[in-house]
């Protein structure tokens, strides 16, 4: 079920930016003050450039890490000395990524400092309040100014790059465990499993490594090409809105630039498919698919979510890889520029591909993926309020978006529901069993009795009741009518 959880997290963002598809005119327009408008244009460009640099760094450095571990496993029979060297490469890679993340945060804080918080967050400016909503769910942090926008963007881009790497190398999470390296709080690697080797180090094992290397390099090349093309297009339109709001020739030129950008994206997509076919076509797909080989079998749920099921051939895998990379790149674009869909619509293009699905409105993410926190004894370390439209039936608080999955907080969860008639109802559960020293994971909580038909406001807080460690797993509020 963990695989489904990570798949649905990705789908959440498809739902977020789908509201910015092609529209008749500017949703937020531009800023009225010319100085602020120029600052917004400068800020937006800085965000995109620095964020793409971080994505490139992570894909490159962690790609090297994954490749070295794969060589140790498949061509060296998991030789201990080889794994130690690979572990050092991975540690170095993660340190470089962490430094790059810090640089992104600092760059955005500096380049966007001339903008007021209001101009950063509102629709006529950068609309960064949209990405801030999800920073609360993912990282427990609130976006209020240029500094927190920079931190949020850096962490989100780092996370999405981790997901891309997991599609390119499904065993990356298991590989890091094998060499004793912690991927970091914002790695977002999906645990697709994978173990052992194919038992042919000089033949099939070597071919598998070459295939995997080709997939990672081609995947990264496509992502950066598509992201760069989208950025050029969005920049051109955003400049028109902010600096030349009444200049139709500016939009006409931007449209031509965007047409070329999307043509380049189509070409890059074709090159990705060709590279996979040429470099992996000679390798038995059974080995590419096997959990002791390429572990592509682990991608089954995610591929199905993108319209590819089952994964029975290299062509199926190729289609899944292209689609997931398209969708995650579009997500990266939205997180760099929340107005991207709106801006693209002004020049006849859309951001979200049709095969990037969205979760149901009755599946509301509260806390995305397991995280550790620093919090004092008795402190509330997570606090989020969401609207939930109750239409009847059962409502559960679960770890999975399908209503399943055990949940826990170290130590206590507090839920307050403000109902349509303005009365409140509460739920409180202590997973520490009175600070007994152990945390008990429980089945999904049935919260149906707290709700009334209509829009309910649900406030969820996590509390470090007993001190010491503070952590929580994913939480989804799920209630699809007749469940």
Image: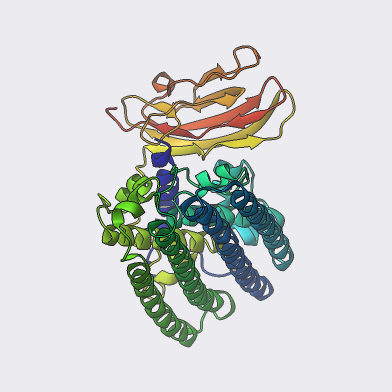
For residue 330, say whether it is visible: yes
Horizontal and vertical percent for residue 187?
58, 49
Q: Considering only vertical position in the picture, is 43 above or below 11?
A: below
Corner quadrant of residue 455: top left
* Residue drawn at the location 30% of the way across and 58% of the way down: 284
Horizontal and vertical percent for residue 192?
43, 44
Closer to us: 420 or 143:
143
Horizontal and vertical percent for residue 25?
42, 70
Corner quadrant of residue 136: top right
Q: Considering only vertical position in the picture, is 408 above or below 13?
A: above
- Specify the color scheme: rainbow
The answer to whether residue 483 is left or right of residue 254 is left
* Residue drawn at the location 62% of the way across and 31% of the way down: 471
* Residue drawn at the location 62% of the way across and 40% of the way down: 140
Closer to us: 178 or 320:
178
Q: Quadrant of the C terminus?
A: top left
Tally the marks. 0
The answer to whether residue 133 is left or right of residue 148 is left
Q: Considering only vertical position in the picture, is 199 above or below 278?
A: above
Q: Quadrant of the N terminus?
A: top left
For residue 294, say whether it is visible: no
Horizontal and vertical percent for residue 319?
31, 61
């Amino acid at each position: 079920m963990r695989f489904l959880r990570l798949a649905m997290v990705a789908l959440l963002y498809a739902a977020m930016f789908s509201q910015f598809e092609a529209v008749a005119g500017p949703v937020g327009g531009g800023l009225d003050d010319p100085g602020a408008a120029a600052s917004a244009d400068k800020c937006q460009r800085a965000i995109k450039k620095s964020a793409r640099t971080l994505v490139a760094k992570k894909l490159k450095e962690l790609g090297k890490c994954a490749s070295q571990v794969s060589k140790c496993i498949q061509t060296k029979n998991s030789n201990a000395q080889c794994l130690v060297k690979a572990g050092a490469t991975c540690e170095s890679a993660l340190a470089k990524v962490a430094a790059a993340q810090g640089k992104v945060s600092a760059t955005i804080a500096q380049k966007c400092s001339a903008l007021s918080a209001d101009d950063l967050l509102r629709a006529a400016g950068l609309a960064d309040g949209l990405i801030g909503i999800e920073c609360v769910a993912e990282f427990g942090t609130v976006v209020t100014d240029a500094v927190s926008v920079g931190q949020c963007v850096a962490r989100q881009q780092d996370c999405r790059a981790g997901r891309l790497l997991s599609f390119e190398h499904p065993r990356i999470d298991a590989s890091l465990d094998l060499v004793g390296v912690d991927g970091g709080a914002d790695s977002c690697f999906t645990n697709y499993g994978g173990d052992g080797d194919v038992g042919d180090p000089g033949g099939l094992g070597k071919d598998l490594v070459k295939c995997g290397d080709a997939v990672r390099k081609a995947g990264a090349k496509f992502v950066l090409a598509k992201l760069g093309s989208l950025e050029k297009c969005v920049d051109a339109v955003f400049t028109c809105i902010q600096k030349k709001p009444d200049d139709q020739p500016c939009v006409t030129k931007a449209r031509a630039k965007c047409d070329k950008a999307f043509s380049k994206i189509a070409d890059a997509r074709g090159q990705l498919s060709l590279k996979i076919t040429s470099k992996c076509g000679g390798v038995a797909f059974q080995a590419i698919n096997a959990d002791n080989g390429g572990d592509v079998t682990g991608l089954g749920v995610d591929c199905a979510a993108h319209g590819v099921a089952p994964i029975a051939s290299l062509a199926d895998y190729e289609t899944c890889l292209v689609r997931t990379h398209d969708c995650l790149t579009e997500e990266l674009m939205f997180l760099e520029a929340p107005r991207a869909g709106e801006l693209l619509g002004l020049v006849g293009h859309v951001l979200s591909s049709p095969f990037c699905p969205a979760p149901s409105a009755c599946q509301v993410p509260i806390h995305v993926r397991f995280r550790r926190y620093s919090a004092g004894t008795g402190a509330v370390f997570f606090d989020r309020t969401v609207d939930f439209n109750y239409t009847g039936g059962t409502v559960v608080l679960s770890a999975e978006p399908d209503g399943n999955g055990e949940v826990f907080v170290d130590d206590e969860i507090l839920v307050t529901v403000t109902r349509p008639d303005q009365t409140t109802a509460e739920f409180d559960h202590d997973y520490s069993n009175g600070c007994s020293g152990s945390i008990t994971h429980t089945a999904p909580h049935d919260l149906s009795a707290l709700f009334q038909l209509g829009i309910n406001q649900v406030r969820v807080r996590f509390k470090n009741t007993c001190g010491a460690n503070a952590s929580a797993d994913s939480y989804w509020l799920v209630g699809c009518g007749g469940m």
